[in-house]
Amino acid sequence: MATGDHFQLGELNGAGDTTILHGEASEDGSQDFNGKALLIVEPDTSLIRQVKHACHGIMTRGRGAGDGVFAESENGDGVFGSADGATSSGVRGESRNGIGVQGVSRNDNGVVGRSTRAAGVVGSSVSGIGVFGECTAVVTIGVGVQGIAKVANNPSVVGVHGLSSEGRGVVGETDKNTGVEGKSTSGVGIYGHSVNNRGGAFEAHQGEGKPVAQLRLVPPRVGPDQGLPRDGQAGDFFVARQGGDSDLVALWFCIASAQGGQTALWGLVAFSQTRNA
């Protein structure tokens, strides 16, 4: 076929130039384009002429580095996919050697997943990482993976949840900074719980043959005249500065929680001996 020939249904059609299908208003502009789409391709679903087997609505193929499908919109989605099957996907990307699905944005999120009843985003791998997050920010503060929970008055909702049947639920690693950091405005910074084992264990490898402490309690920045925590709970440890020109500190252990108008009761931990390292 040559450029300008009629399009033949059910036949192989060819063209030497780009084919453009325009949706237009009337010549005088009084009547807008009538329709919700410029082109609709769908199988017949009537009782007699319905298509019996599964078939694709549209199949396209690019050449070389060209895209198989390229779509863009002024204010809507570039590509929208919808599926009703329980095991079907609204949009699916597959690649033999590259990325299956990639989202890129100049000023917003590259990929966003939402769900009303299940996970917004699920990553799965047979032998690699299920979900991988990376930040390459040099000047600004960036985060490789961030989880946020915005449900009010529901402490069971968490920002990030790690789950493993036999391995570790969450692992944080770094070469020169803190492996895992916990912060809270009014709750516990880091909480560890185990049903049949210890709630927390701390280990420090002896780098370069030098002993390294397994745990450190950072003394408060305030002076010694601030006293001990009045709302302490039984089992709390507290390190207080001794005051004066001395850099020495004292270790206190809470033996009775604050209750009934009574402040917490603390006991000073005495050491049988001290020595310089």
Image (tube, rainbow, N blue to C red):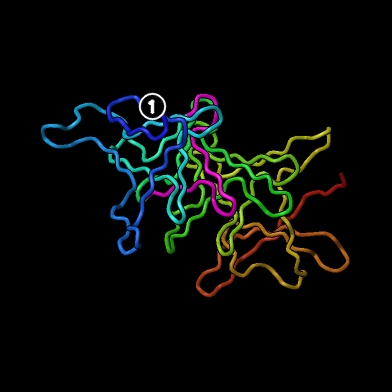
- Residue 89, position as x, y percentages in the image: 36, 37
Residue at the image point whose x is 30% and y is 25% from the top: 11
Foreground pick, 157 / 33: 33
108 in magenta = yes
- Residue 44, position as x, y percentages in the image: 20, 36
Give above or below for 34 relative to 169.
Answer: below
The residue where tag 1 is placed is: 1
Q: Which residues are magenta?
A: 95-115
- Residue 12, position as x, y percentages in the image: 34, 24
Quarter assignment of residue 107: bottom right
Q: In the rendered view of the protein, which quadrant contains the C terminus?
A: top right
Badge count:
1
Left or right of residue 32: residue 213? right
Q: In the rendered view of the protein, which quadrant contains the N terminus?
A: top left
Residue at the image point whose x is 75% and y is 73% from the top: 225
- Residue 167, position as x, y percentages in the image: 53, 32
Residue at the image point whose x is 68% and y is 38% from the top: 203
Element under disc 1: loop
Give above or below for 206 relative to 144.
Answer: above
Give above or below for 154 relative to 93.
Answer: below
Foreground pick, 109 / 70: 70
Which residue sits furthest bottom? Answer: 261
Give above or below for 153 relative to 118.
Answer: below
Quarter assignment of residue 224: bottom right
